[in-house]
Image (cartoon, rainbow, N blue to C red):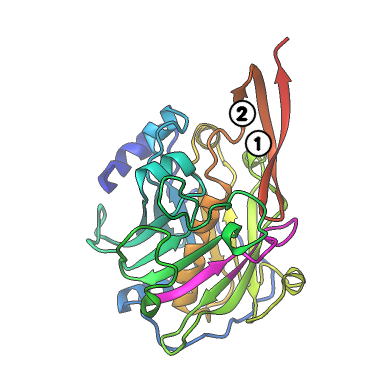
């Protein structure tokens, strides 16, 4: 599917307006993150764009073959990013991943998420200005980066991690493991234990004068999310300023939401409700609370949002499905030390 097909998608009854949500001022004290470096590997155009945008709407596009087959055919994800203030499309994010890993291991598979500038109204740039690499579980590959990713976060091999790089990168997703360190913008890391009963991620930034990434923020989400709860509740992941070496217990004591928020938005209409039930195409809002946050930190937060989508909201038939002659109604999912467990009502046939 090309970007020009967006017009046809918007005419469909399941499509969503580009900016269907009103601005809401969050009455939370603003805090400032310390920049890791005054330099950045991002190009001038990207720096200007991120510097002048404090609120983003990210709209995942419907993949029709995947929707019609209810996940039997897994297509590459695609996201359109809008400036919430101007309602203008400013980026397109495209997934690149091996077909077998995507079909057999989704949503825990390795992938590249490539970020492109929008050129004009319908075209995108030829080359991505940055690329996120998610290390995942790839059962069809010779070497699996994270073989136990869908289980409890007991070791690094079963904990989430992604890296963000400036420009395009080559090779297979999951194999980089910091090999292109000179182009690295930052990374997102799940601590051992996953945060306990609420998911925690540490978001790191890397300056050109630094050998390693340094934590500038921590993110925490709710214990319960997904399933049928998506129809009536926003799912908010709050972010707060954090330092290197911070422990999980110290992270839980932070004032989440004072730095930035990542919010998966609930449906606002019947049409959007149908979209939520029959597809895994979601809508997110990313908002920053301070104008002093650096463009590179914003880039890392946007990459974290894409990572979150794959971690929690790319599950096929997450609300209702049939198995073993029984109807399963998933009320919500529960996060337990890195593992996502459904809370279901099972109606067996007599």
Q: Quadrant of the C terminus?
A: top right
> Could you tell which of marks 2 and 1 lies nearer the N-terminus?
1
Q: Quadrant of the N terminus?
A: top left
Q: Residue at x 72, y 32 (%)?
A: 344
For residue 228, the mark is 1
Q: CA distance from mark 2 to mark 1?
A: 8 Å
> Helix or strand or loop: what does disc 2 sit on?
strand
Q: Nearer the viewer, residue 64 or 58?
A: 64
Q: Which residue is mark 2?
A: 320
Q: Nearer the viewer, residue 59 or 52?
A: 59
For residue 148, the mark is none
Q: Nearer the viewer, residue 172 or 288?
A: 172
Query: From this viewpoint, is residue 87 visible?
Result: no
Decide if residue 230 is on the left or right side of residue 316. right
Which region is colored magenta?
184-202
Query: From this viewpoint, is residue 43 visible?
Result: yes
Is residue 43 positioned above or below 62 on the image? below
Q: Residue at x 57, y 41 (%)?
A: 267
Q: Nearer the viewer, residue 340 or 47?
A: 340
Is 208 within the magenta? no
> What percent of the width, then of the height, locates residue 99?
36, 43
> Helix or strand or loop: what does disc 1 sit on?
helix
> What percent of the width, then of the height, locates residue 237?
63, 59
Q: Answer yes or no: do the residues labelled 2 and 1 have beta carbons within 8 Å?
A: yes
């Amino acid at each position: 599917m090309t970007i020009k097909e967006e017009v046809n998608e918007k005419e469909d009854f399941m499509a969503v307006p580009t900016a269907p949500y009103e601005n809401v001022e969050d009455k939370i004290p603003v805090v400032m993150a310390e920049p890791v470096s005054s330099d950045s590997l991002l190009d001038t155009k990207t720096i200007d764009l991120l510097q002048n945008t404090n609120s983003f709407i990210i709209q995942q596009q419907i993949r029709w073959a995947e929707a019609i087959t209810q996940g039997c055919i897994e297509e590459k994800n695609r996201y359109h990013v809008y400036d919430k203030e101007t309602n203008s499309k400013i980026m397109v994010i495209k997934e690149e991943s091996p077909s077998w890993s995507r079909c057999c291991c989704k949503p825990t598979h390795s992938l590249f998420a490539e970020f492109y500038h929008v050129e004009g109204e319908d075209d995108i740039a030829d080359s991505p200005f940055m690329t996120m690499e998610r290390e995942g579980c790839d059962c069809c590959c010779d070497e699996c980066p994270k073989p136990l990713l869908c289980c409890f976060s007991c070791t690094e091999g079963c904990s989430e991690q992604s890296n963000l790089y400036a420009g395009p990168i080559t090779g297979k997703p999951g194999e980089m493991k910091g090999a292109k360190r000179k182009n690295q913008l930052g990374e997102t890391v799940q601590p051992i234990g996953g945060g306990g009963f609420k998911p925690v991620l540490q978001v790191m930034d890397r300056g050109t004068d630094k050998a390693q990434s340094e934590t500038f923020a921590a993110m925490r989400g709710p214990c319960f999310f997904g399933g049928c709860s998506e129809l009536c509740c926003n799912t908010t992941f709050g972010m707060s300023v954090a330092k290197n070496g911070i422990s999980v217990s110290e992270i839980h004591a932070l004032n989440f939401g004072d730095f930035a928020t990542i919010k998966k938005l609930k449906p606002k209409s019947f049409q959007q409700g149908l979209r939520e039930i029959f597809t895994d195409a979601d809508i997110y809002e990313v908002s920053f609370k301070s104008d002093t946050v650096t463009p590179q930190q914003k880039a890392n937060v946007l990459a974290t949002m894409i990572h979150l989508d794959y971690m929690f909201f790319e599950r096929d038939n997450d609300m209702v499905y049939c198995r073993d002659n029984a109807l399963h109604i998933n009320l919500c999912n529960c996060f337990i030390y890195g593992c996502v467990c459904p809370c279901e009502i099972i109606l067996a046939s007599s």
